[in-house]
Image (tube, grey):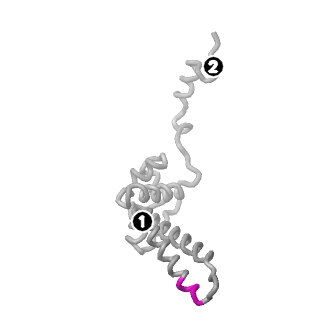
């Protein structure tokens, strides 16, 4: 009898008997992945959902892995909040750059202010967790640990 590739019992034993280091998850850019996971958690579950276990679980690493990139939970939250503010600012600036005064150039400032307000309120309404996080602290995050 022949076994389909990978289904031979000896093959299964060999895979499960692999050294632990061969099965350990290694991420290419863990810091960025943790920030993205934090933004995603804030968007879907609110700013209060940002904890080291929740963020690292979303990325698929152990909670201790976050400490290679962030000194503590406060540093992670401040970094995610800063990224939320940057994304809001980029979206608003992009939108403002697309507005052209149709007809009367004197209307351009009012049109830009209107677009700014719509984008700002839209951010708050559509992503309240990110909005809460972005507005919670204007403090700059501490530098990442050396490593």
Q: Position of residue 11 (x, y in %)?
A: 59, 22
Instruction: Say above or below: 98 vs 63.
Output: below
Q: What residue span does the magenta drawing correspond to?
A: 106-110
Q: Considering depth in this image, is 84 or 106 the residue closer to the camera?
A: 106
Residue 125 circle label: 1
Q: Residue at x 63, y 19 (%)?
A: 4
Extreme-left residue of the structure? 48
- Label 1 or label 2, whichever comes before in sequence order: 2
Q: Residue at x 42, y 75 (%)?
A: 138
Callouts 1 and 2 close, C-beta under 8 Å: no
Q: Residue at x 40, y 64 (%)?
A: 128
Q: Position of residue 46 (x, y in %)?
A: 38, 59
Instruction: Say above or below: 53 vs 122.
Output: above
Q: Position of residue 43 (x, y in %)?
A: 43, 58
Q: Secondary structure at mark 2?
A: loop
Count the marks.
Answer: 2
Residue labelled with disc 2 = 4
Q: Position of residue 20 (x, y in %)?
A: 51, 36
The image quadrant that residue 104 belongs to is bottom right
> Foreground mark, 1 or 2?
1
Residue 65 on the magenta segment? no
In this picture, residue 24 sits left or right of residue 81: right
Q: Mark 1 to mark 2: distance in Å?
A: 53 Å
Residue 105 circle label: none
Q: Considering depth in this image, is 19 or 111 the residue closer to the camera?
A: 111
């Amino acid at each position: 009898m022949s076994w389909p590739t990978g289904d031979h019992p000896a093959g299964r034993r060999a895979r499960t008997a692999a050294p632990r280091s061969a099965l350990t998850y290694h991420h290419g850019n863990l810091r960025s992945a943790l920030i993205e996971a934090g933004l995603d958690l804030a968007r879907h579950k609110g700013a209060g959902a940002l904890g080291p276990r929740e963020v690292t679980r979303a990325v698929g690493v152990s909670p201790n892995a976050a400490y290679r990139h962030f000194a503590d939970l406060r540093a992670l939250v401040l970094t995610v909040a800063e990224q939320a503010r940057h994304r809001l600012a980029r979206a608003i600036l992009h939108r403002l750059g697309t507005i052209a005064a149709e007809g009367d150039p004197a209307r351009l400032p009012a049109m830009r202010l209107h677009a700014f307000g719509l984008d700002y309120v839209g951010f708050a309404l559509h992503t309240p967790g990110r909005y809460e996080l972005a507005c919670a602290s204007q403090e700059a995050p501490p530098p990442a640990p050396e490593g």
